[in-house]
Amino acid sequence: MSVHFEERSGVVPCKTPWGSWSQTMEEVFIEVDVPHGTSAKEIKCRLGSRDIELHVKGEEIFKGKLFDTTMSDEATWTLEDKCLIRIILMKTNREAGNCWSSLLEGEYCANAWVQDQMQRKLTLERFQRENPGFDFSGAEISGNFAGGGPDFSSLQK
């Protein structure tokens, strides 16, 4: 479900010195630019449920405690065209209100505008899941969307 929503609505990337990261309700995507010609043998990537570490050609790109927990046995990384590393982490908490404000605790933080856009996007993704017959990919949202938006669960259908 997320993939199709993201294809139609785009992503909200958080730029970093090494590339960018973005998120959906279920996943965190990390893109790391590496020197052209990099081989997989030159990459050391450790993906834990609470921490992450990436070294390329012996140089540390990042290392630290993730903003929140992930499912380490479902995490993957790939090297594309010998110049881009893509890492996919599966969030443990897959609610719209679980919008990461940084990739690592205290590092690679989203600025206020990017954080706002990420939270809006996750809220619209939640609405899409709750209302599969509608298309929220181009929708705008205003009002109370922080924490995953308003809770309509108590309304009678």
Image: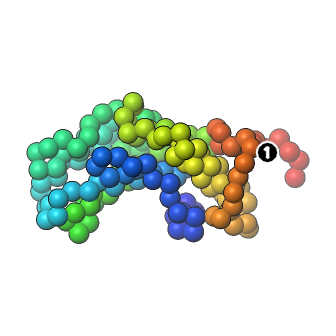
**Residue 115 is at least partly visible in this image:** yes
Closer to us: 147 or 139: 139
Q: Quadrant of residue 144?
A: top right
Picture residue at 65% right of the left edge, 65% below the top:
138
* In the displayed structure image, the side of residue 32 where residue 134 appears, left or right: right
Across and down, in percent, residue 90 comes to 44, 49
Q: Residue at x 41, y 44 (%)?
A: 71
**Relative to residue 29, is residue 91 depicted above or below?**
above
Q: Measuring from the top left, give residue 154's x and y in whole percent.
A: 83, 41
Q: Quadrant where the N terminus lies?
A: bottom right
Q: Quadrant of residue 65?
A: top left
Residues 108 and 96: in front is: 108
> Which residue is labeled 1 in the image?
152
Residue 77 appears in view: no
Identify residue type, mark 1. Phe
The quadrant in which residue 35 appears is: bottom left
- What x and y, as percent, mark residue 124? 65, 54
Say what secondary structure mark 1 lies in: loop
